Amino acid sequence: MTSHFTSVDDVLTRLADAGYLASDAIATTVFLADALGKPLLVEGPAGVGKTELAKAVTSALTATTGEDADLVRLQCYEGIDEARALYEWNHAKQLLRITANTALAQTNATGTTAQATDDEVAHDWQALATDIFTDEFLLTRPLLRAIRNEQPTVLLVDELDKADVEVEGLLLEVLSDFQVTVPELGTLAATQRPFVVLTSNAARDLSEALRRRCLFLHIDYPSAELEQRIVALKVPGLDAALAESVVRLVQRLREMPLRKAPSIAETVDWARTLVALGADSSDDLDPTVLRANLGVLLKHQDDIERASTLLKLNA
């Protein structure tokens, strides 16, 4: 098992180079997941950078190994099953092969059609069954693709809490032994272990069996200081005092009883909005401007009305 990071500081540096400003807790957990070869389960509110962490680790692995690392993403949703997560057989292609082989088997050497005996049919079917359950007919889905990939790989299982509990069972073999068992082909083991990141918004409890196999990381909304650094990195044209005012307002919004608090991505979007509107300083954040652009930060009308009232932005 090869470690890709030399220290926690190395993780901090490489993630920052990839545009992800990590806290010490995040960097430490990423370092340990890499050093121990353990999957990383990341929980937290929507929009705090869970998915972005997996993307940043992919960029960091590319820089570290000198090879183009692959990000293999399994986006979970209600009703996702083995055929979408692991693999399935290409039934249409198998049927074409069966049809072609059957026609060929029933044609004799002179080009005429002859009736095959039962023994001949049984023998031909055994040969055909062996022929159609091969890699040629296997459609690999994200879990199997990550296992078989020979490049440095990050496997992102995104929003696992949206999937049914049965999907967790599919993951257990992958997370424990980094292998997948295909009954017709046997056990397919990873040539090199992928770095696995599972994310959850905690919409439902994940099983203890799955949690045991992972290192756990909770990412919450960042501190004002860290969020200001993120805004400065993502929106370099923003005045420092204005960036501070933006972050201060977003932090106030998160303390309100809203249906959906603004995420880090929405903070960055709002900062870009202000730049696009020509705001040069915190003096430009008058109530009219704030009220007109709250839809960038808040995604429900009742949240906008509540925030406008509490911030005294109503006309």
Image: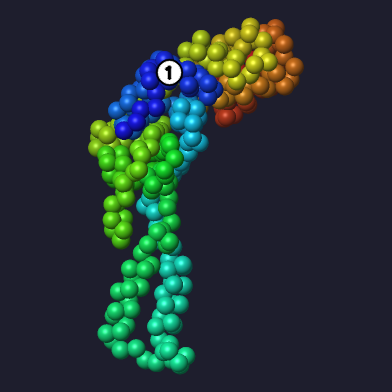
Task: Between residue 217 and residue 309, name the one nearer to us.
Answer: 217
Question: Secondary structure under badge 1?
Answer: helix
The answer to whether 1 appears left or right of 307 in the picture is left
Q: Quadrant of the N terminus?
A: top left
In the displayed structure, 188 sits above or below 52; it is: below
The answer to whether 236 appears left or right of 208 in the picture is right
Give the percent coordinates (x, y) of residue 187: 28, 52
Task: Between residue 278 and residue 301, name the one nearer to us.
Answer: 278
Which color scheme did the rendering employ for the protein? rainbow
Q: Residue at x 37, y 44 (%)?
A: 147
Q: Residue at x 42, y 68 (%)?
A: 94
Question: Which residue is the site of mark 1?
Answer: 10
State whether residue 160 appears in this view. Answer: yes
Q: Quadrant of the C terminus?
A: top right
Give the percent coordinates (x, y) of residue 222: 47, 16
Give the percent coordinates (x, y) of residue 84: 42, 51
- Labels in figure, total: 1
Q: Give the image quarter of residue 151.
A: top left
Q: Residue at x 49, y 31 (%)?
A: 66
In the displayed structure, 93 sits above or below 192; it is: below
Give the percent coordinates (x, y) of residue 107: 43, 87
Q: Residue at x 72, y 14 (%)?
A: 279
Q: Amino acid at mark 1?
A: Asp
Q: Residues within 10 Å of mark 1 (few under 14, many from 20)?
A: some
Task: Between residue 54 and residue 122, name the one nearer to us.
Answer: 122
State whether residue 43 appears in this view. Answer: no
Which residue is most to the right? Answer: 278
Q: Give the image quarter of residue 119.
A: bottom left
Task: Between residue 281 and residue 107, name the one nearer to us.
Answer: 107
